[in-house]
Amino acid sequence: MLKIGHRGAAAYAPENTLTSFRRAVELGADGVEFDLHRARDGTFVVLHDDTVDRTTDGHGKVEALTVAELRRFDAGSWKGREFAGERIPTFDEVIAAVPQRILLFAELKDGSARSPGIEDALARFIRERGVVERVRVSSFDHRALARLRPLVPDLETGALFTGLPVDLVALARNAAAQAVHPSFHYLTREAVEEAHRAGLAVNAWTVNEPEDIEAVRGMGVDGIFSDHPDRLR
Protein backbone atom coordinates (compact mmCIF):
# COMPACT_ATOMS: atom_id res chain seq x y z
CA MET A 1 0.00 0.00 0.00
CA LEU A 2 1.33 3.41 -0.98
CA LYS A 3 1.85 5.90 1.84
CA ILE A 4 1.11 9.34 0.38
CA GLY A 5 1.72 12.60 2.20
CA HIS A 6 -1.26 14.92 1.68
CA ARG A 7 0.06 18.35 0.67
CA GLY A 8 3.33 16.95 1.97
CA ALA A 9 3.14 16.40 5.71
CA ALA A 10 0.46 19.00 6.31
CA ALA A 11 0.03 18.12 9.98
CA TYR A 12 3.63 19.09 10.69
CA ALA A 13 4.59 21.79 8.18
CA PRO A 14 2.92 24.42 5.99
CA GLU A 15 0.92 22.60 3.34
CA ASN A 16 2.21 22.49 -0.22
CA THR A 17 5.69 23.79 0.61
CA LEU A 18 9.10 22.27 0.01
CA THR A 19 9.56 21.89 3.76
CA SER A 20 6.32 19.94 3.94
CA PHE A 21 7.33 17.62 1.09
CA ARG A 22 10.76 16.96 2.58
CA ARG A 23 9.15 16.24 5.94
CA ALA A 24 6.82 13.71 4.33
CA VAL A 25 9.81 11.91 2.83
CA GLU A 26 11.53 11.88 6.23
CA LEU A 27 8.37 10.35 7.72
CA GLY A 28 8.41 7.45 5.28
CA ALA A 29 6.05 8.55 2.51
CA ASP A 30 6.21 6.73 -0.82
CA GLY A 31 4.63 9.73 -2.54
CA VAL A 32 3.64 13.33 -1.95
CA GLU A 33 0.40 14.96 -3.05
CA PHE A 34 0.10 18.61 -4.03
CA ASP A 35 -2.16 21.01 -5.89
CA LEU A 36 -1.43 22.69 -9.20
CA HIS A 37 -2.48 26.09 -10.51
CA ARG A 38 -1.06 28.27 -13.27
CA ALA A 39 0.30 31.70 -12.49
CA ARG A 40 -0.45 34.59 -14.82
CA ASP A 41 2.76 33.94 -16.76
CA GLY A 42 1.86 30.27 -17.28
CA THR A 43 4.17 28.82 -14.64
CA PHE A 44 2.80 25.83 -12.74
CA VAL A 45 2.75 26.68 -9.05
CA VAL A 46 1.83 24.60 -6.02
CA LEU A 47 -1.03 25.93 -3.90
CA HIS A 48 -4.39 24.51 -2.89
CA ASP A 49 -6.71 27.50 -3.08
CA ASP A 50 -7.33 29.68 -6.11
CA THR A 51 -6.27 32.67 -3.99
CA VAL A 52 -3.17 33.16 -1.86
CA ASP A 53 -5.12 34.62 1.05
CA ARG A 54 -5.44 31.61 3.38
CA THR A 55 -1.89 30.28 3.32
CA THR A 56 0.26 33.36 2.70
CA ASP A 57 0.53 36.96 3.84
CA GLY A 58 -0.56 38.09 0.38
CA HIS A 59 -3.87 38.69 -1.31
CA GLY A 60 -5.27 37.91 -4.71
CA LYS A 61 -6.05 35.27 -7.28
CA VAL A 62 -3.22 32.94 -8.26
CA GLU A 63 -4.09 33.29 -11.94
CA ALA A 64 -3.78 37.09 -11.69
CA LEU A 65 -0.24 37.04 -10.27
CA THR A 66 3.08 36.23 -11.91
CA VAL A 67 5.37 33.67 -10.33
CA ALA A 68 7.71 36.51 -9.31
CA GLU A 69 4.84 38.21 -7.50
CA LEU A 70 3.73 34.98 -5.86
CA ARG A 71 7.21 34.29 -4.55
CA ARG A 72 7.23 37.52 -2.57
CA PHE A 73 4.63 36.12 -0.20
CA ASP A 74 5.40 34.29 3.03
CA ALA A 75 3.76 30.87 2.77
CA GLY A 76 4.94 29.55 6.11
CA SER A 77 4.29 31.93 9.00
CA TRP A 78 0.58 31.06 9.22
CA LYS A 79 1.65 27.57 10.39
CA GLY A 80 4.29 28.78 12.83
CA ARG A 81 7.06 31.31 13.25
CA GLU A 82 9.66 28.64 12.59
CA PHE A 83 8.37 28.43 9.01
CA ALA A 84 8.67 32.15 8.26
CA GLY A 85 10.04 32.85 4.80
CA GLU A 86 8.72 29.67 3.20
CA ARG A 87 7.71 30.38 -0.40
CA ILE A 88 5.08 29.10 -2.80
CA PRO A 89 6.98 26.50 -4.83
CA THR A 90 6.81 25.87 -8.55
CA PHE A 91 6.21 22.40 -9.95
CA ASP A 92 9.81 22.41 -11.19
CA GLU A 93 11.07 23.07 -7.66
CA VAL A 94 9.05 20.18 -6.26
CA ILE A 95 10.48 17.82 -8.88
CA ALA A 96 14.01 18.93 -7.97
CA ALA A 97 13.48 18.84 -4.20
CA VAL A 98 11.86 15.43 -3.85
CA PRO A 99 13.99 12.28 -4.31
CA GLN A 100 13.37 10.48 -7.59
CA ARG A 101 12.08 7.37 -5.83
CA ILE A 102 9.13 9.38 -4.46
CA LEU A 103 5.96 9.50 -6.55
CA LEU A 104 4.44 12.91 -7.29
CA PHE A 105 0.64 13.04 -7.03
CA ALA A 106 -0.35 16.31 -8.69
CA GLU A 107 -3.95 17.44 -8.39
CA LEU A 108 -4.97 19.66 -11.29
CA LYS A 109 -7.33 22.19 -9.74
CA ASP A 110 -8.77 23.64 -12.96
CA GLY A 111 -9.34 22.25 -16.42
CA SER A 112 -9.69 24.13 -19.70
CA ALA A 113 -13.13 25.41 -18.75
CA ARG A 114 -11.47 27.80 -16.28
CA SER A 115 -7.87 27.75 -17.51
CA PRO A 116 -7.88 27.38 -21.31
CA GLY A 117 -5.22 25.07 -22.68
CA ILE A 118 -4.00 23.88 -19.29
CA GLU A 119 -4.09 20.19 -20.21
CA ASP A 120 -1.84 20.79 -23.23
CA ALA A 121 0.52 22.87 -21.11
CA LEU A 122 0.70 20.21 -18.40
CA ALA A 123 1.25 17.43 -20.91
CA ARG A 124 4.08 19.38 -22.50
CA PHE A 125 5.59 20.13 -19.08
CA ILE A 126 5.56 16.46 -18.07
CA ARG A 127 7.00 15.24 -21.36
CA GLU A 128 9.76 17.84 -21.53
CA ARG A 129 10.95 17.05 -18.00
CA GLY A 130 10.82 13.31 -18.48
CA VAL A 131 8.71 12.66 -15.38
CA VAL A 132 5.88 10.59 -16.86
CA GLU A 133 6.76 7.61 -14.67
CA ARG A 134 6.99 9.68 -11.47
CA VAL A 135 3.89 11.83 -11.82
CA ARG A 136 0.29 10.82 -11.16
CA VAL A 137 -2.27 13.46 -12.14
CA SER A 138 -5.66 13.60 -10.44
CA SER A 139 -8.58 15.99 -10.67
CA PHE A 140 -12.22 16.51 -9.75
CA ASP A 141 -12.56 17.79 -13.33
CA HIS A 142 -12.93 14.46 -15.09
CA ARG A 143 -13.17 16.11 -18.50
CA ALA A 144 -9.70 17.52 -17.94
CA LEU A 145 -8.37 14.02 -17.24
CA ALA A 146 -10.03 12.70 -20.39
CA ARG A 147 -8.42 15.51 -22.41
CA LEU A 148 -5.04 14.75 -20.87
CA ARG A 149 -5.11 11.02 -21.67
CA PRO A 150 -4.34 11.16 -25.43
CA LEU A 151 -1.72 13.86 -24.87
CA VAL A 152 0.35 11.64 -22.54
CA PRO A 153 -0.90 8.07 -23.04
CA ASP A 154 1.53 6.56 -20.53
CA LEU A 155 0.59 8.97 -17.74
CA GLU A 156 -1.35 7.48 -14.82
CA THR A 157 -4.37 9.55 -13.84
CA GLY A 158 -6.86 9.36 -11.00
CA ALA A 159 -10.48 10.50 -10.85
CA LEU A 160 -11.19 12.37 -7.62
CA PHE A 161 -14.65 12.37 -6.09
CA THR A 162 -16.30 12.97 -2.74
CA GLY A 163 -19.41 10.78 -2.52
CA LEU A 164 -19.48 7.21 -3.79
CA PRO A 165 -20.83 7.21 -7.36
CA VAL A 166 -23.48 4.77 -8.47
CA ASP A 167 -21.07 3.28 -10.99
CA LEU A 168 -17.46 3.66 -9.89
CA VAL A 169 -16.07 1.92 -12.95
CA ALA A 170 -18.07 4.04 -15.41
CA LEU A 171 -16.86 7.19 -13.67
CA ALA A 172 -13.25 6.13 -14.12
CA ARG A 173 -13.80 5.08 -17.72
CA ASN A 174 -15.45 8.40 -18.58
CA ALA A 175 -12.41 10.17 -17.15
CA ALA A 176 -10.05 7.80 -19.01
CA ALA A 177 -8.42 7.21 -15.62
CA GLN A 178 -6.55 4.17 -14.33
CA ALA A 179 -7.26 4.99 -10.69
CA VAL A 180 -10.04 6.35 -8.51
CA HIS A 181 -9.38 8.64 -5.55
CA PRO A 182 -12.44 8.60 -3.26
CA SER A 183 -13.00 10.31 0.06
CA PHE A 184 -12.56 7.57 2.63
CA HIS A 185 -15.79 8.57 4.39
CA TYR A 186 -17.86 6.95 1.63
CA LEU A 187 -15.61 4.04 0.77
CA THR A 188 -16.62 0.41 1.20
CA ARG A 189 -14.80 -2.86 0.75
CA GLU A 190 -17.29 -3.75 -1.99
CA ALA A 191 -16.42 -0.59 -3.92
CA VAL A 192 -12.70 -1.35 -3.65
CA GLU A 193 -13.25 -4.89 -4.89
CA GLU A 194 -15.39 -3.63 -7.78
CA ALA A 195 -12.66 -1.20 -8.81
CA HIS A 196 -9.98 -3.88 -8.59
CA ARG A 197 -12.00 -6.27 -10.74
CA ALA A 198 -12.03 -3.54 -13.40
CA GLY A 199 -8.26 -3.09 -13.10
CA LEU A 200 -8.48 0.24 -11.29
CA ALA A 201 -6.26 1.33 -8.41
CA VAL A 202 -7.96 2.86 -5.36
CA ASN A 203 -6.25 5.62 -3.38
CA ALA A 204 -8.31 7.05 -0.50
CA TRP A 205 -8.16 10.56 0.96
CA THR A 206 -7.62 12.14 3.49
CA VAL A 207 -7.21 9.60 6.28
CA ASN A 208 -5.65 10.91 9.49
CA GLU A 209 -6.97 9.09 12.55
CA PRO A 210 -5.31 5.75 13.41
CA GLU A 211 -8.60 3.86 13.63
CA ASP A 212 -9.69 5.19 10.22
CA ILE A 213 -6.33 4.31 8.70
CA GLU A 214 -6.66 0.72 9.90
CA ALA A 215 -10.24 0.47 8.63
CA VAL A 216 -9.36 1.80 5.18
CA ARG A 217 -6.22 -0.32 4.98
CA GLY A 218 -8.41 -3.33 5.75
CA MET A 219 -10.55 -2.59 2.70
CA GLY A 220 -7.57 -3.41 0.49
CA VAL A 221 -6.90 0.03 -0.96
CA ASP A 222 -3.77 0.62 -3.02
CA GLY A 223 -2.84 3.90 -1.35
CA ILE A 224 -3.82 6.31 1.41
CA PHE A 225 -3.39 10.08 1.43
CA SER A 226 -2.73 11.46 4.92
CA ASP A 227 -1.60 14.66 6.60
CA HIS A 228 0.24 12.28 8.96
CA PRO A 229 2.29 10.04 6.66
CA ASP A 230 4.13 8.63 9.67
CA ARG A 231 0.88 7.00 10.81
CA LEU A 232 0.71 4.96 7.60
CA ARG A 233 3.66 2.77 8.49
Image (cartoon, rainbow, N blue to C red):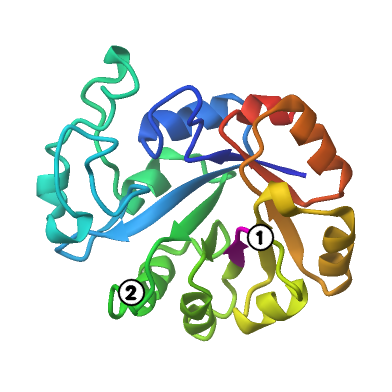
Local packing at callout 1 (Cα closer than 10 Å; few below 14, some 14-19, many 20+) is few
Q: Position of residue 165 (x, y in %)?
A: 71, 69
Q: Identify which residue, 211 or 179, lies in the foreground.
A: 211
Single out the residue that lies furthest toward the top: 82
The residue that label 1 is drawn on is: 163
Local packing at callout 2 (Cα closer than 10 Å; few below 14, some 14-19, many 20+) is many
Seen at 46% across and 30% down, the residue is 22
Q: Identify which residue, 154 or 106, lies in the foreground.
A: 106
* Residue 118, numbered label: 2
Tell us which disc is closer to us: 1 or 2.
1
Q: Which of the 4 quarters of the picture holds residue 53?
A: top left
Give the quarter of the figure containing the N terminus. Answer: top right
The answer to whether residue 63 is magenta is no
Disc with the residue nearer the chain's start (1 vs 2): 2
Q: Amino acid at mark 2?
A: Ile
Q: Amino acid at mark 1?
A: Gly
The answer to whether residue 159 is magenta is yes
Q: Is residue 96 left or right of residue 81?
A: right
Residue contact at pointers 1 and 2, CB within 8 angstroms: no
Seen at 11% across and 48% down, the residue is 68
* Residue 81, numbered label: none
Q: Identify which residue, 135 or 138, lies in the foreground.
A: 138
Q: Identify which residue, 61 or 158, lies in the foreground.
A: 61
Counting labels gives: 2
Residue 175 versus residue 214 in the image, above or below? below
The boundaries of the magenta stretch are 158-162
